[in-house]
Amino acid sequence: MDALHALTASDLLALYRSGQLSPVDVTQAILDRVARLNPTLNAFCVVDPDAALADARASQARWLHHRQHGSPVGALDGVPVSIKDLILTRGWPTLRGSRTIDAAQPWDIDAPVTARLREAGAVLLGKTTTPEFGCKAETNSPLHGITRNPWNLSCTPGGSSGGAAAAVAAGLGPLAVGTDGAGSVRIPAAFCGNVGMKPSFGRVPAYPLSPFGTVAHLGAHTMGVTDCALMLNVMKQPDARDWHALPADPADYTIGLNDGIRGLRIAYSPTLGHAKVHPDVAQAVDRAVASLQAQGALVEQVDPGFEDPLDISTGLWFAVAYQLWCALTPAQQALADPDFAAEAVQGGALDAAALHQLNQRRGALGSLMRQFMQRYDLLVTPAVAIPAFEARPAGHGRMTPETMLGWTPFSYPFNLTQQPAITVPCGLTGGGLPIGLQFVGPMFGDALVLRAARAYEALHPVPRPPELL
């Protein structure tokens, strides 16, 4: 019972099926662990033990009926999961990490991903921390303070899905939902030693649509690739509220997951032609790529051929920050994160012509990558150029494009192009911090990205952080 937090979703489902474990026992063990560790990590901003245990008891009854009568159970029945605090969840406030949102209002709508998880029988534990409006790649806010990395409490888990990543890494539930507008699933997954996937844009329906528009994806944080496939099978189910949603995908992402990568054409770009990469990261990713070659992949070191699109990503991002800022009252603006305020100021300097030019350049980048991916099945890069850095409070330094995203040059380009991308752990730095390996697929190649990540993970199991406290 002391090790229930170390079980994956796949493990739990097998043990529920055999009757060796019950969802109630697992949920209570995870809740006890949250109560012990969350005051230190600050991964959760809402925890609802009563609701979670009610979900668990209902799941336990379904599993009992299933074993006795063969009745159906949900695809994630009884598996604990957390929801990032940008995503609507019926019965709980969605404050988006902001002091500007009134918690005293009806919270009676589930976002599509929340609804699908409930329908699949998942046990909803609570909501995980995010910076204000998901506005940066660190997880801190005036509302909830600093979230910390389970591998080293002095370090950030990254962001903006930092609470989700910290929760999974620390064993506070095996599954977590995140969002990714410039790397916000993959950055914290890399910093915390998890698997994190940003599916093709539109594959996981969203409602309401992110104010940051068509760069924002919903994705999964998990302890392993198989769990990621299980979770995406559920999350990708259609919802008419999202007018960007892709047509229904009948594929089961767990089928063919272990087919390997022999014969796949892989482009390996250690720097994308312009990035500066920490030596420990560069060496770990080189070793990982050698392992892919040893498994029979046809690897070619080649850059896609685009210049750093940092100004495109941050320009579009800051413009939306300005729009959100203008919708706040002066009293609300006084409560806002100084980092968000600084983004809004920079966004206000962009006129319509500048925004149109940014979108045109984004389109050219998307076209370039569609053409590049005709020659290769996958692109492999580091996930983040550096290891996790110091955890700091909101407003700790000057907010610029470089300080916001300049250190994560491998993530935001593929939000602009909307391609699927996943990060898996590929080693540790000399200081004992996780390093991430990123697989980028062609548009709609979600199953292929999962398969490649699984092939690497099968020979290099995901490490877990040292036990906390």
Image (cartoon, helix red, strand yellow):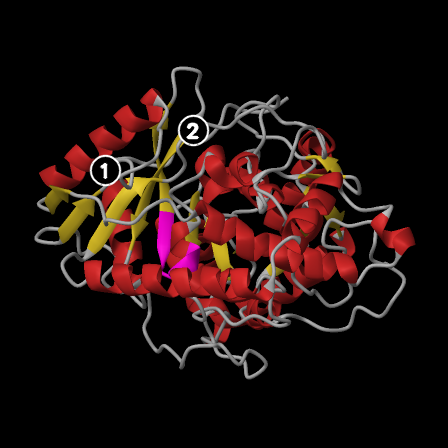
Q: Nearer the viewer, mark 1 or mark 2?
A: 2
- The quarter of the image holding the N terminus is top right
Q: Which stretch appears magenta? A: 415-422
**Cβ–Cβ below 8 Å for labels 1 and 2?**
no
| Rendering coords of residue 300 (x, y %) | 12, 43
Q: What amino acid is labelled 1 in the image?
A: Leu
Q: CA distance from mark 1 to mark 2?
A: 24 Å
| Rendering coords of residue 412 (x, y %) | 44, 49
Residue drawn at x 59%, y 81% is 241
- Residue 451 shown left or right of residue 113 in the figure: left
Give the answer, above or below, for where 102 lies relative to 459. Answer: below
Q: Nearer the viewer, residue 30 or 234?
A: 234
| Rendering coords of residue 266 (x, y %) | 16, 49
Specify the farthest residue to the top: 430
Can I make out residue 401 in this image? Answer: yes
- Residue 373 shown left or right of residue 393 in the figure: left
Q: What amino acid is labelled 2 in the image?
A: Ile
Secondary structure category for the residue under label 2: loop
Q: Nearer the viewer, residue 116 or 181?
A: 181
Q: Quadrant of residue 268?
A: top left
Disc 2 crowd, CA 10 A, few/some/many (<14, 14-19, 20+):
many
- Residue 354 shown left or right of residue 104 in the figure: left
Residue drawn at x 47%, y 37% is 406
Residue drawn at x 70%, y 28% is 396
Give the answer, above or below, for where 422 lies relative to 237. Answer: above
Residue picked out by circle 2:
386
Give the answer, above or below, for where 469 lies relative to 111. Answer: above
Q: Quadrant of residue 436?
A: top left
The label on residue 459 is 1
| Rendering coords of residue 107 (x, y %) | 79, 68
Residue 276 in magenta?
Answer: no
